[in-house]
Image (cartoon, rainbow, N blue to C red):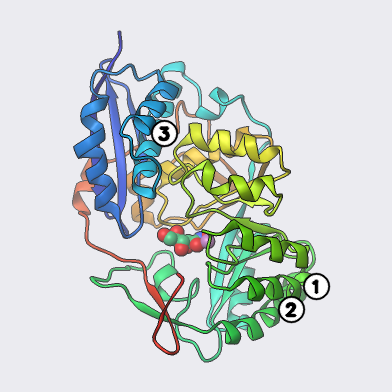
Amino acid sequence: MTVITSAEVLVSRPGRNFVTLRITTSDGVTGLGDATLNGRELAVASYLSDHVAPLLIGLDPHRIEDTWQYLYRGPYWRRGPVTMASIAAVDTALWDIKGKVAGLPVYQLLGGASRTGCLAYGHAHGATPQETVEAAHAVLARGFRAVRLQSGVPGLGDIYGVGASTLPGDEVRWSRPLEEQWDSSKYLRFVPSLFELGRAELGEDVHLLHDVHHRLSPIEAARLAVDLEPYRLFWLEDVTPAEDPAVLRRVRAASTTPLAIGEVFNSVFDIKPMLEERLIDYVRMAVTHGGGISAVRKILDFASMFNARSGMHGPEDISPVGFAASLHLGLAVHNFGIQEFAGYTDETLALFQPGFTFDDGYLHPGEAPGLGVSYDDTIGEAHPYEANYLPVNRLLDGSVHDW
Ligand code: EZ4
Ligand code: CO
């Protein structure tokens, strides 16, 4: 019988830290999984190498569902981002192996393509709405049909989506978190003008999106959703902190602006009440943080019963392995909605050599067996881990606010 003979945890930093799991079988087949948890990378690396890898040796690599259940139910301590990113990496690597053994891309194992490509959205940001709209023109010129607009707010410095912390390609590293400023009233007054300009300059056809990054109170969130209605957003993302689903009732009742939530969720139980009450339109959970291909497949099937679609998280800090896994799943499920595509640096692409393609606004995972991603050890070893934190956020009076 074929068994798992090794499970290696590879931590590397081609511009930013990534945690990659590589499982090898007794037949010499390898599979990759992504376990990157931005700012807490070594916690997942330890969970995998100290607690999970020893359990995998000798298991049948083809028993994906059984291995998922063994790692979820077995340790007694369920859920949480560290545990679920670790399980996700194992699950993803086993799907990669199964695809390679079958000679099929993973999306074929998931039922085959439901579409010709996955609609993607890119990021545009600037210090002012004018700069943001210029950046959006450049994004659309690259073929995107959908774009997220984030702009600096007068009176605030670097904020989410426009500061150095989120510029793809920038060297970002702090030994302590950078501290950003926030003021919801300044933001609320300002944001409609960004979308007024964006809609006027970018036209009616383009899909416009916006990420609030968990910063508003329920009543503020309701007001923003109402104020943005004239600009017909594709979605408004993470309007409130995600712990309390009940607050979304107020936002939902107030407005027809579509809502997306869930990039920080790690279990179906996080999103279940929002789906059952039809409070959201898009599920942001991605393969890397949602428990793997197997788990997110189930979550999206569940979401389909409540008219919700996928809107999987695709930031620079999900590695090309995790991103490819989300694309295979997105191509296969019927209720795909849109895929975030922040893009990767050349160093990252050289390390992983992903086979996915982007053409005319649509992503495709490619036809290589498995996930279609590889890992170059020489490049990985040349870019060792360095500590890095996400920023934190303080109000103007110095108190800590939601990030
Ligand atoms: O802040 O992935 O929609 N995308 C986002 C991201 C998250 C980062 C956190 O690691 O909100 O930019
Ligand atoms: Co977000």
Do callouts 1 and 3 mark residues in contact (Cβ within 8 Å)? Answer: no
Find residue 187 and report its image quarter: bottom right
Q: Secondary structure at mark 1?
A: helix
* Residue to which mark 2 is pinned: 196
* Residue to which mark 1 is pinned: 230
> x, y percentage for residue 349?
39, 49
**Amino acid type, mark 3:** Thr
Q: Of callouts 2 and 3, which one flags the residue occurring earlier in the amino acid sequence?
A: 3
Of the 4 image quadrants, the one containing the C terminus is bottom left
Q: Secondary structure at mark 3?
A: helix
> x, y percentage for residue 77?
33, 40
Do callouts 1 and 2 mark residues in contact (Cβ within 8 Å)? Answer: yes
Q: Of callouts 1 and 2, which one flags the residue occurring earlier in the amino acid sequence?
A: 2
How many other residues sit within 10 Å of disc 2, few (<14), some (14-19) or many (≥20)?
some
Tell me if I can see residue 362 in this picture: no
Q: Nearer the viewer, mark 1 or mark 2?
A: 1
**Amino acid type, mark 1:** Pro
Depth check: give the residue in front, 178 or 368: 178
Depth check: give the residue in front, 146 or 60: 60
Q: Of callouts 1 and 3, which one flags the residue occurring earlier in the amino acid sequence?
A: 3
